[in-house]
Image: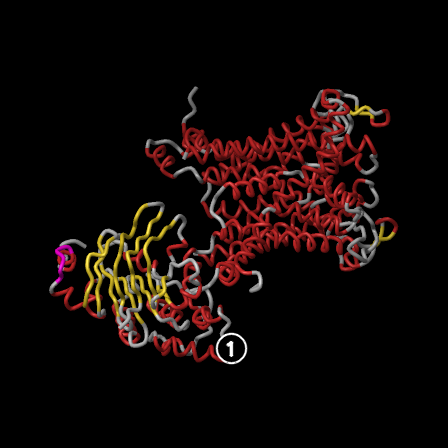
Amino acid sequence: MRIPPRLTQAGAFVILGSATLLTLAVLAFIIGFVLQKGLPVLSLRFLFTNPQDMGRAGGILPMVVGTVLLPVLAVTLATPLGVGTAVFLTEYTRESRVTRLIRFGTDCLAGIPSIIFGLFGFIFFVTTLRMGWSILSGGLTLAFMILPTIIRTSEEAVKAVPKSFREVSFSLGATRWQTVRKVVLPNALPGIVTGVMLGVARSIEETAVVIFTAGSALRMPTSLLDSTRTMAVHFYILAREGISTENAYGTAATLVILILAVNLLAYWLMHRVMAKRS
Amino acid sequence: MKPKFDIQGLSVYFHRVPYLRSVHLTVPVNRILGIIGPSGSGKTTFLRALNRMNELEPDSHVEGAALLDGRDIYHPKYDVVGLRKKVGMVFALPVALPMSIYDNVVYGPRLSGSQRHRQDGLVETSLKAAFLWDEVKDRLKTSALRLSGGQQQRLCLARTLALEPEVILLDEPCSGLDPISTGKIEEALTLLKERYTIILVTNNTKQAARISNEVAFFLMGEMVEAGPTERIFTRPGDKRTNDYITGRFG
Amino acid sequence: MKLIGEKGVRGILLGIAFSALSALLLIALFIMSEGLPFMFRYGLKGFLFSSEWQPEIGKFGIFPMIVSSLWVTLGAMAIGGPLGVAGAVFLTEFVPRSVMRVVKPITELLAGIPSVVYGFIGVIVLAPLIRGHLGGPGLSVLAGSVVLGIMILPTVISISIDSILAVPQSYREGSLALGATTWQTVHMVTVKAARSGIIASIILAMGRALGETMAVIMVAGNSVKIPHSPLDSVRTLTANIALEMGYATGLHRQALFATGVVLFVMIMVLNIVAGLAIRKRVGKK
């Protein structure tokens, strides 16, 4: 039996549309569910007091601190390395075996699952380098993890700077490094920042890596060598051990809002860059 | 009088293919030399060879010599960065850097660490010499991207002048501009030749006839002939020059 | 900076550019140095193909985990793949571009939600549903597949959209000019042309699913056994490592690193296959 094309067209529209709606519905459900259960728990007190009784009561201040410190440390290390790599690949070489090797390394690094980063961070930073479970170990491991993202976005941002800008700079007697510093990088900045934000978002949501490298201490960290717990880790422990479903939801809500905010900021920035180009 | 530029058998290759073949030419000081010829004849390649901009292309290779004030700029020890400050360039498409008008003009001088107190004066002189000062003097700190095409091109000229070069190279600077902007630039160049040596590549033979003192005709990577403007346009030595000037081919 | 000079700057940047490669080598080195000796000492066959995982008596067979990982991943593929491709096709061919430009980033937000949140919702919402309607403990292969399937949606949708957009408009116009409807054009021309990109996105997503840890720990049950039905509780390779690393010592720890090596190899293979598929697409154009 041949179904008339009009019917298959309509049918396809409905089926494919439903699939899309399903995807969006799931997203809405997840965010809605977390926020619905978690927002009531969320308050300034929740965010700014210390946990009590293993997290059954009290707030999540140390976790907020940890969630801020780890990505900051990771980004501080990964950004110069990532931008430097991007600048080198675009400005200082032509495509060659060397560049292909560098790209291969970057792509492979991007494909490594987080649990392996966790293992690596544990055996290298925590054990071999004797840093112990600490913010330092966690931040350094996370830096490795987000490096490929920053390299990729930075390279795209640098490539997007028009060639004519560089030509003009050279013709005015600038060296290559001066041109990079004064013309290329300032123009590529929004794109670079977008990549950095994506790296931050990734660090915030990472759990396996953090547990294996920064540990899960509840106390407020006082130095880079202290162990700490991020909100994601705290949520995991609260939920899994069944310590406090309420606080788990509160932590989850904070986490989701934070990540959404960072992602939205990154996209808004990216759109501003696009708009400026056209 | 010693020529500013003495080009001796200059050839330029890209990917082993010759784009410019054995050019011999002297450029007198404080004159405007117009370079004419159809597209693809090597005019731009020649111009860019004079401030070693060709080197920015991959796999480029140069033979022969180009003497600036008696010294070969292609000598391995010659300071390329310094060369580009001595020999400034204005491109065909106006490329204003995405900064304020002020910052555009002082970009070059700042690179060599000019002093703050000199900069204001430098900006004013340069913009005046490019016939742009009156139009922008009240908005020096606004973005240069807001200027019209003609204004941007004059800005590029001012930017080059701010480096206080000795030679100014211009690659079809008026190609996209309206007649009024073109006129302003031509007026500026005519005044500027008193203090600078100017080499102007142009597709517009009438422009060359209007403002240049000497003319060189390029065809297919070779320089066919060169001489005073008046002579080239009235009694050209080579038939090809005559054909080009009279519009037999374009 | 003046002291270093241009050559110095280039040298420094060259060194920096190798940081990613160095990191990769460092990671490979340390993981392998902990895992490989164990694999050879214990015996590759016994490690990979034995079903006995009892660290207390020195038995380290990870076959059940390998099988479980594969099942959960394939299940995720079965759920996320079609859903993702359907969404991508709908968003590129059936709605105006402006709608796609808004919805695509929104689906990418799905990627931003932490895996632990996914896992938790799976436990609270999905597992009881499975347990109630289909039986079994609820925490199962099925639960893992569903959760992972949803987690890989952004990857599949995003890359598939890019692949479909890359199909030249002339293909579509040629088909439509012959009187085909949009749907006919889509399934006879456009999707076929974008096929390698779409497949690459699915393979890439498989790699991500294989490597996912936190969500599966919470939702797949973690029993060490070979699953006979989607309702069985299973433990994946990643879960195995994460659960036992905290207290493992000596040979046990090395076995976990060796598990990591196996995982690493599996994912690398997938990524290379995906890369080849993408390259084929670029080459074909």
Q: Check the image and tell me how it is coloured.
A: secondary structure
Whether residue A196 sits left or right of residue A62 in the image: it is: left
Badge 1, how many Cα within 10 Å: few under 14, some, many 20+?
A: few
Whether B158 is drawn above or below A87: the answer is below
In magenta segment, residue B239: yes
Residue C205 quadrant: top right
Q: Secondary structure at mark 1?
A: helix
Amino acid on which disc 1 is placed: Arg
Is residue B228 shown left or right of residue B185? left
Q: Classify the position of the C terminus of chain B by image quarter.
A: bottom left
Residue in front for this viewpoint, B232 or C168: B232
User: Which range is magenta?
Assistant: B236-240
Q: Chain of mark 1?
A: B
Based on the picture, tell me whether residue C119 belongs to the magenta stretch: no
The residue that label 1 is drawn on is B116
Q: Position of residue A137 (x, y in %)?
A: 75, 48
- Whether residue B184 is visible, yes or no, is no
Q: Nearer the viewer, residue C155 or A31?
A: C155
Most prominent secondary structure in the magenta stretch? Answer: loop
Residue A181 falls left or right of residue A44: left
The residue at the point 39 percent across, 52 percent down is B57
Q: How many marks?
A: 1
Return the x and y of residue A233 as percentages of the image width and height: 76, 46
Q: Is residue C223 visible?
A: yes
Q: Nearer the viewer, residue A230 or B32?
A: B32
Q: Quadrant of residue B135?
A: bottom left
Looking at the image, is B224 positioned above or below residue C192?
below
Residue B118 location in percent, x, y?
47, 79
Which corner quadrant holds the N terminus of chain B?
A: bottom left
